[in-house]
Amino acid sequence: MSAFLDYWGECAGRPAMVWVDRAGNHRLLPYSHFAGCAARFAGLLDDLGLATGESVAVLLPPVPEWWEVAAGAMRAGVPFAPMPCGVLDGDRLRAAGAAVLVVDEAHLEPALALRRAGGVRHVICVGDLPHAEAMNYRAMMFLAETEHEPAPPGGPVLLAGDESYSHADLRRLAVGLGLAWLDRRRDDLHWSLTPRHTAAGVLLGLIEPWSAGAAILVDETGGDPMRVRGLLERFRVNTISAPGSSYVELAGTDLRGLRNSALRRVLATGAQPDAGAARAWSRQTGLWIHPGPAPAAALTNCATFPGAF
């Protein structure tokens, strides 16, 4: 993670994320932004003195800070544990060995209750209001040092569900998902609707596109079908990945506007869409939904930045 963030961060202004807020306004964030934030968050974790086996858990909506925390934890060599949206699960946090919990203001009080009960040691809040019992994310990031060298790869980097993943595990998962089929290009814009608390979601929504120097589209709302279709028509999205059920819902809208869009690859994760949805996509857009792993031979044609993962 640190290798390709630092590499692409040297390219002045190279876009890493197009972030769309609830009102539909968008911000363009460059790789240099995430490289700097990753270094600062890694420095913050170093100052907090996490022990071996402890992790960083995060429960945030789709905001840029989620990606800053993920990249920073990986840079620091601290396992990153993304939590499903909704109610904080103390058992899941304890199973992940979470010492640090990053939340938004909506989840601050339950997070503090867990800290008081000994569930986590530190709560960091991404929000504008200070709190006596929590660290303010922006203030702590402003004070954090950035001179820490990236941790060498080794051990788990991601805790998703009941599984832990090392760099090698993530590479194997990428092969199993057929991600080489995406034929990543550095000027692409990728959009992943695969849940971010899953390993596939982290691969598709962070590691895979950023390792290629591509940008990602992030929608703060999560996206209902009509909004998803509208954003696909509005932005030059080249690759979309989503659970099969999302394509079934999208097939119920008028997809003909996507036929002349920049969309090139459509990938289904998890349960696959039914045949009717697949036919609707093909008929209206000229695109087939890719259902499974790519042939192993395709991996030899997929250029990967040295040091990816």
Image: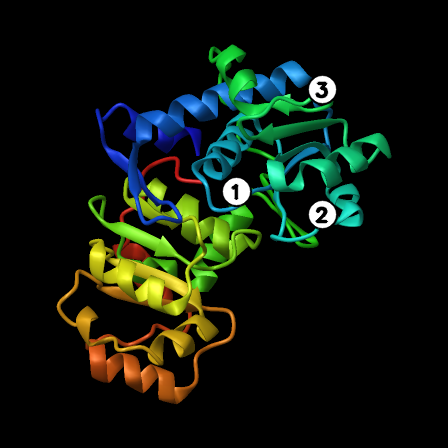
Task: Tell me the tag on residue 88.
Answer: 2
Residue type at numbered disc 2: Leu
Residue type at numbered disc 3: Ala
Residue 119: horizontal and vertical position, in percent?
81, 36
- Select label 1 or label 3 by which is in front: 3
Q: Nearer the viewer, residue 85 or 13?
A: 85
Residue type at numbered disc 1: His
Q: Image check: 176 left or right of 26?
A: right
Dividing the picture into quarters, in which one does residue 157 lie?
top right
> Can residue 294 be seen at all in this image of the molecule?
no
Name the residue carrying label 3. 132
Disc 2 or 1, which lies upstream in sequence? 2
Q: Which residue sits furthest right?
A: 117
Q: Are marks 2 and 3 in contact (CB under 8 Å)?
A: no
Residue 237: horizontal and vertical position, in percent?
24, 56
> Can residue 200 be seen at all in this image of the molecule?
yes
- Select label 2 or label 3 by which is in front: 3
Name the residue carrying label 1. 167
Indicate the secondary structure of the residue bearing disc 1: helix
Q: Residue at x 58, y 34 (%)?
A: 154
Q: Residues within 10 Å of mark 2 (few under 14, many from 20)?
A: some
Task: Tell me the tag on residue 159.
Answer: none
Disc 1 or 3, which lies upstream in sequence? 3
Q: Is residue 294 above or below residue 145?
A: below
Q: Residue at x 34, y 82 (%)?
A: 278
- Spatial CA span between label 2 and label 1: 27 Å
Indicate the secondary structure of the residue bearing disc 3: loop
Q: Residue at x 49, y 16 (%)?
A: 149
